[in-house]
Amino acid sequence: MSDIEKKSIDLATQEVLKKAKDENIKTAWDRLESQEPQCGFGQLGLCCTICNMGPCRIDPFGEGAQVGVCGANADTIAARNLARKIAVGASAHSDHGRDVAYTLSLLSEGHAHDYEILDIEKLKNLAQEFGIDTNKPAGSGLASDSQSHKVKEQIAKELSKKLLEEFGKQEGELVFTKRAPKKRQAIWKKLGITPRGIDREVVELLHTTTMGVDNDYKNIINNGMRCALSDGWGGSMVATDVQDIILGAPEPIRGKVNLGVLKENCVNIVVHGHEPILSEMAVKASQDPELIKLAKAKGAEGINLAGICCTANEVLMRHGVPVAGNFLQQELAIITGAVEVMMVDVQCIMPALQEVAACFHTKLITTNPKARFPGVTHIEFESEKAYEVAKQIIKVGIENFSNRNKERVNIPKYEMDLVAGFTKEIVFQILGGKYRATYKPLNEAIISGRLRGLAGVVGCNNPKQTHDYFHTTLVKELIKNDILVLQTGCSAIACAKQGLLIPEAAKVYAGKGLQEICEAVGIPPVLHLGSCVDNSRILTAASYIIEEGGLGQDLSDIPAAGCAPEWMSEKAITIGFYFVASGVYTIFGASPFATLGSKNLTDYLTKDLEGIVGGRFEFCDDPIKMAQLMIEHIDKKRKALNLRPRMYQ
Ligand code: BF8
């Protein structure tokens, strides 16, 4: 295996990495090499920098210091480090959710003219969930669609207020926690981990992990779980549901993926980041006749919009916009030499992009006041003038087309078809028919053993692992064993590139039972549910499964497992914790999240938690082994439900 093959299994990535090497352009893989050997104390979670008596480190071999200057031992230090990552991950998703809820509020007051309420049914359902009367109270004088219904803007106004209150809530629990099965809610209550205000959970976790507060590693982790739950059943759920309301709920849609989606003769605009509020407008602006005319006047055939990371997933799910790649391909998209503008919002945007872009004509444009680069063009996004801002950015790309050096353009010819756009509602419709919305066929498929179980495979890429290899090897093994795989984030992009997200993949890769289901309803064996905040869709879908009946009383009863095989972000840690705290057995690849330095903490996460919350962590760095562990767990759950192992052996 060549050096480049060790870096990625993706042929497009390999091709551009060769180009980067030839042109001496450094990428994440090179920077990883220059960091090696990485700090062992950091890797084990044994380095403490939270006060100025440190940095302190604990000797993992038991010979040197076993406590820091303040007296904190390995358990406390490793647990605090981990909990702080949970808080950061939760804050990222939740801040995203808040911004989307705020846009709904602006829209309801007539200030965000470029958006409209596209999913009225979802708006009403959500409003009712929050106790808002969607009918016009008699004699209220409120404007109404008809005699008895409030206008949607009024509902949106009341709803956005309630949603925004979820962040600063001082009393009571998050409304979305009521979506979980009763038994799960009771477990959280008993443990005192039902999340309260979203901001409160983040702040409290940061407080309790500062010097000299919480020194009990188990208590730190329990509080960490509550914070993570405030993301999964709070901030992320707000983001997902409100995005569906104002951008439209996704429906199954065909698209294309990989660097080959960049077009040689077009102005290529790449959207990258996480918040789809602006990229949604970029989609619209890229179809603006005035801008297309301008692009043609500059010698291009048109405007080609493509995405990277989760912003890509968002615009793919709703519009079929092609995906140029996942996390580790962000630099590579620029290195093709064919990108006029890469516009970024927040999260997972490598600081290195600035230097890579400087090697080409590519203009990197930041759009969010929270995420800027020194010296990089900043065109600030405002919901009130969203379309105008999107047009301005695309114009920069069009003007930049003539600066492209055609001799340096090298777009790999690799692209793959995919189907995305599955949501918890669409699963209803596809499996149960539009007019008989039910999870019954899905539950029956699991009960009969035609489907052995479900798996959520999510998360990032990490140059420490062969890019895309872990995701795709694991997922192939799961579907071969009749396990329907639900995906989000960069993991979904990885599998899409290998052709696993098309219905035809069932025939090639799936076991007989899963194949029968895919053929009957025309779905791929791997369902793309969206971006990382859309992991909340998995939680709600799992709750519907329990509500449907026949598969136990709690989320932990479902024959299901989760995995983040190539994770790197703190957000992935938070997702892992809210899955585990919701009762899901969850495997993390790469190195464990800096816990191994404390045996007590590692045992707590990988063993004890199962008896406490029903879910637990597992750390594993072999994708086939990961699949085996997930299958073993699924079979264990089937046995507990008295279900036969599998219809076809
Ligand atoms: O939120 S999977 S690399 S892009 S963190 Fe980032 Fe990881 Fe990709 Fe989406 Ni999620």
Image (spheres, grey):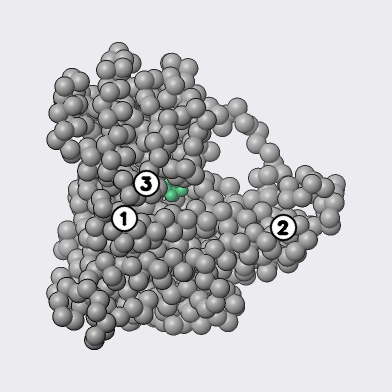
Quadrant of the image containing the N terminus = top left
Question: Which residue matches tag 2?
Answer: 210
- Dot 3: element: loop
Q: Which mark is residue 111?
A: 1
**Image spot of residue 3 (x, y percent):** 48, 26
Cβ of mark 3 under 8 Å from ligand 1: the answer is no
**Image spot of residue 196 (x, y percent):** 53, 72
Callout 3–callout 2 Cβ contact below 8 Å: no
Q: Is disc 2 surrounded by few (<14), some (14 to 19) or many (20+) residues within 10 Å?
A: some
Measured in 3D between alpha carbons, the distance from the residue under mark 3 to the one under mark 2, in whole angstroms, is 35 Å
Between residue 367 and residue 618, name the one nearer to us: 367
Identity of the residue drawn at 40% across and 33% down: 365
Image-quadrant location for residue 608: bottom right
Question: Which residue matches tag 3?
Answer: 382
Between residue 456 and residue 618, name the one nearer to us: 456
Identity of the residue drawn at 39% across and 20% down: 360
Q: Earlier in the sequence, mark 2 or mark 1?
A: 1
